[in-house]
Image (cartoon, rainbow, N blue to C red):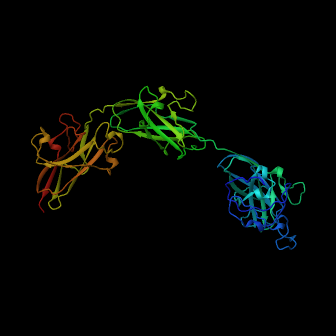
Amino acid sequence: MPIKPNIALAATCLCALLCASAFMACDDNDEKGSNDPIHTPDASSDSDADTQMPPDGSEPDPDAASVEWCQLMSPKSAALSVGQKLTAYAEVYVKDRTEGAGQTANGVRGQLGVVAADSVATAADWTWIEATFNPNFDDASGNHDEHMADFSASVVGEFAYAFRFQVEGGAWFYCDTDGHSASNAELGFSLEALGRLSVTQAQPASVGWCRLQNASEVIQVQQDFTAYGQVFVEGLTAGNADNARITGQLGAGPVGSSAQDWPASAWVTATHNASADLTSLGANDSEYMATLTSIPVGTYAYAFRFQVDDGSWLYCDSDGHDGTPGGFSIEKQGTLSVEAAATAQVGWCQMVGNSPTWITVMEGNERFTAYAQLYVAGITDQGFNVDSARVRGQLGYGALPDTLLDVDNWNWQWIAATHNASADPNSLSVNDSEYMATLTSISVGTYAYAFRFQVDDGAWFYCDTDGNDGAPGSLSLEKLGELIVEAP
């Protein structure tokens, strides 16, 4: 007996086949067997299993419903790699059962069988799996139903496959690619018309192409740098797919050196960019992104690289690399310039909102919240209402000073202000940020109050209710806030 193929199918059973030249109808007695991928009927199987005789020995019912025609429709032949799945389809006609729009509970049962090509005539070597009714079948004839089944192969080789159908547990009726009719002798079942499947070893996946998106960037020290890379892997990246088999990395090294020579420490892991602009991404490609942080002042080369299943790396420049020799160019690597940060300072600030020139608070309920807005070039203009750790704000109060000279030595009480994430966008410029602070436990008396800000622990910049842009005379004693705390 030929060696049985180890085909990874959810097998149900084997029905004995009559001979090498053709399949005949048979009963279903020998199907209730093993759930193993290959089930071979043992020697005790009913010797009449090859005939159409009912198991009790009575004569078949000539009026019982039976399959009158069936055909393996598609695919008639196929080529797969090990582990790939194929869906096969067959049509069937049973009088009074398959007419109309199709039924899922009409007593018609289908199975898909597969066997090694050199064992098609050996009944015990076939593996059968249950087929399901196809509700999406468009029946041009109006009389047929379509069933479908999936199978995959775990070994390399040449295989054959066919369908079979039965009605209400009756005799099996076998289908080839030419069609099998119970009433037309010219449409018999033929082993020469089986479906044919060629299974080859799956080739290791590899990166077919990749590209560095941004070719040059200039940032200031303490700023992070994010770069993007696009990649194509056949069968894995279509539609910006995120596939765990793909690893991407962003690396940086000395200008003039090749990314292919950079050490492992020069690389950081990239993540899939689910928000990629699909208009700039090929239909079969995916985009990844990675960020470099804490980069010292200097000029660097940078590049992306990708691998699949821990395979070899493919390095990406801004011109794209498809793996051909010489396809990666040092001259096409990205260039990153990190510059020393200019000394930042407050350019403008103003007390706003409920920060009038005066306010009265009764003692015992002496809680007062004030607000101020500020602008710092390169910080608050990097988005709406930016919260930066480099900016520090305070709200202070005390006796009204006699002069604006030596403001840092005013004998005032100062408390830390916090960023107001809930600032009203209608009252805040797109380039400014808003801070707030609350005074509590204030004794009876009359006070002046103001905000002040600093950047990177630099000089304090004071704000009044009219706004201060640093110009001479812009800060005014008359425009400081006035706070009156009265006894109840």
Residue 480 visible here? yes
User: Viewed as shown, does residue 226 lie left or right of 68?
Assistant: left
Q: What is the quadrant of residue 124 in the picture?
A: bottom right
Residue 66 vs residue 125, the one in the foreground: 125
Q: What is the quadrant of residue 105 in the picture?
A: bottom right
User: Viewed as shown, does residue 188 lie left or right of 434?
Assistant: right
| x 72%, y 66%: residue | 33
Q: Position of residue 160 (x, y in %)?
A: 76, 51
In the rendered image, which quarter contains the N terminus? bottom right
| x 82%, y 71%: residue | 55
| x 86%, y 60%: residue | 182
User: Viewed as shown, does residue 251 lie left or right of 210?
Assistant: left
Q: Position of residue 208 (x, y in %)?
A: 58, 36
Residue 466 visible here? no
Q: Position of residue 246 (x, y in %)?
A: 53, 43
In the rendered image, which quarter contains the C terminus? bottom left
Residue 172 versus residue 231 in the image, above or below: below
User: Viewed as shown, does residue 305 lie left or right of 29?
Assistant: left
Q: Position of residue 119 (x, y in %)?
A: 78, 52
